Image: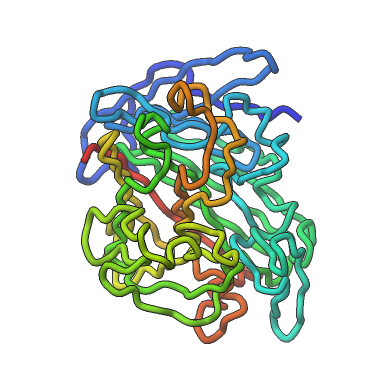
């Protein structure tokens, strides 16, 4: 299977109605460039806006982001997301880390591989111990999406997911994701419908970041990056399998799970806490983070997460309409997965433990099995309804 890579081809100036407002009347340039044959008949397609975000590329396999170049404090373009040089390797990698893809139709965990709709119990594939992760091993990150639209500043991928193509998932689902660049931001919008039956739908964009592009000679770990979640004082308490217990806790200032009390807290600010090595479960073997923080009382269009690196000077800001975010600090990478050739330093060319972070916006983890949270209706979509998801990332210098 060839994962056709998509890239922009010729310079074009344009105005976009979607980009008016604070930047109304400002003209931007989007560069298109035909990449040509890359040895496997692949082509690339990317979006190239102004400001610090300089280039972004995608492939249809998993509707995956493959490259995201940002200018660092020295004016150099650095690729700040994980991935492979060879786009054909995305479907071939046996570890399948869901690099920057769209898993679905229901992301994260379903407890004990079961859920109930209108009194009927559905059993899902247990691909994560006793639980289901990302809807199982035939989720949307394993599928090749169709390109349905491509303009100077956006590209749309679509997928038709038959009933029970993932075990325990009823009803045909039609979904699409549109990636665009606008006012220096990478914007993502998803829609999904289930015209035949009620079914779980909860989506996310599963991007892994290292804002240093692994070029920090002192460390390839993520602990010196800073994270600020100003509207996320509460989080879902989880068990050793990263499955929520039902309890919602408040992070005390300065505690392991506190990223709300002040800006600029390092991801590793609690590394010396005795509980840090087991903070994300696995019987004490998961160091760091793999949990869900609630977003509460955020004004419309507020920045709900800020990730930054003093080494590169890059700051990434997330806006989303979702109810919370998962923070995953890449505990399970073991140093065998290669970096892209444009990343790393001479003696470090692989993705090691705790060397990246995923910030995944979506609804409450396993909310379908916790009616006490009041999220079940948000996570079930049926005939006549449309599921929507919107987020954007803006990149600048600290």
Q: Nearer the viewer, residue 118 or 249?
A: 249
Foreground pick, 266 / 117: 266
Q: For the C terminus, which image quadrant?
A: top left
* Relative image position of residue 356 (x, y in whole percent): 46, 44
Point 56% across, 58% down: residue: 203
Which residue is painted at 29% across and 32% down in the image?
52
Residue 17 locus on image (x, y percent)? 33, 41
Please say if 40 is above or below 267.
Answer: above
The image position of residue 376, as x and y in percent, is: 57, 78
Q: Nearer the viewer, residue 260 or 26?
A: 260
Mark count: 0
Relative to 137, say whether 23 is above or below. above
Image location of residue 363, percent across then percent down: 50, 67
**Relative to 202, is 85 above or below?**
above
Along the line of sight, the residue nearer the viewer: 272 or 41:
272
Residue 219 appears in the figure:
yes
Tell me the quadrant of the picture where the N terminus can be found: top right
Identified at 54% across, 32% down, the residue is 350
Name the colour scheme.
rainbow
Q: Is residue 28 left or right of residue 377?
A: left
Rendered image quadrant of residue 273 = bottom left
Q: Could you tell me which residue is drawn at 38 percent across and 27 percent down?
A: 78
Q: Is residue 326 visible?
A: no
């Amino acid at each position: 299977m060839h994962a056709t890579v998509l890239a922009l081809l010729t310079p074009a100036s344009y105005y976009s109605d979607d980009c008016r407002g604070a930047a109304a009347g400002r003209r931007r340039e989007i560069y298109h460039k035909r990449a040509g044959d890359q040895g496997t008949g692949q082509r690339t397609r990317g979006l190239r806006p102004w400001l610090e975000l300089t280039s972004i590329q995608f492939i249809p396999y998993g509707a995956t982001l493959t490259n995201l170049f940002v200018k660092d404090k020295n004016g150099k373009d650095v690729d700040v997301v994980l991935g492979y040089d060879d786009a054909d390797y995305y479907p071939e990698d046996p570890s399948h880390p869901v690099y920057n893809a769209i898993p679905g139709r229901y992301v994260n965990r379903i407890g004990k591989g079961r859920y109930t709709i209108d009194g009927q119990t559905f059993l899902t594939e247990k691909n994560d111990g006793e639980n289901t992760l990302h809807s199982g091993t035939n989720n949307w990150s394993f599928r090749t999406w169709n390109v349905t639209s491509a303009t100077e500043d956006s590209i749309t991928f679509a997928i038709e997911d038959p009933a029970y193509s993932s075990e325990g998932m009823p009803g045909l689902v039609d979904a699409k994701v549109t990636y665009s660049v606008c006012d220096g931001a990478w914007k993502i919008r998803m829609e999904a419908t289930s015209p035949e039956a009620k079914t779980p739908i909860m989506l996310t964009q599963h991007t892994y970041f290292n804002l240093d592009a692994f070029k920090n000679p002192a460390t390839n770990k993520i602990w010196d990056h800073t994270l600020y979640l100003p509207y996320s004082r509460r989080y879902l308490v989880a068990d050793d399998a990263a499955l929520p217990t039902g309890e919602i806790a408040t992070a005390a200032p300065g505690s392991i799970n506190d990223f709300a009390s002040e800006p600029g807290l390092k991801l590793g600010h609690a590394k010396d806490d005795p509980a840090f090595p087991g903070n994300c479960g696995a019987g004490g073997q998961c160091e760091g983070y793999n949990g869900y923080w609630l977003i509460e009382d955020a004004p419309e269009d507020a920045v709900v997460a800020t990730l930054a690196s003093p080494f590169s000077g890059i700051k990434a800001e997330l806006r989303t309409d979702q109810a919370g975010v998962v923070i995953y600090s890449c505990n399970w990478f073991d140093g065998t997965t290669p970096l892209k050739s444009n990343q790393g330093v001479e003696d470090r060319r692989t993705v090691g433990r705790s060397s990246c972070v995923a910030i995944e916006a979506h609804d409450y983890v396993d909310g379908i099995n916790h009616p006490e949270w009041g999220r079940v209706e948000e996570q079930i979509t049926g005939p006549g309804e449309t599921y929507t998801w919107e987020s954007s990332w803006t990149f600048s210098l600290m």
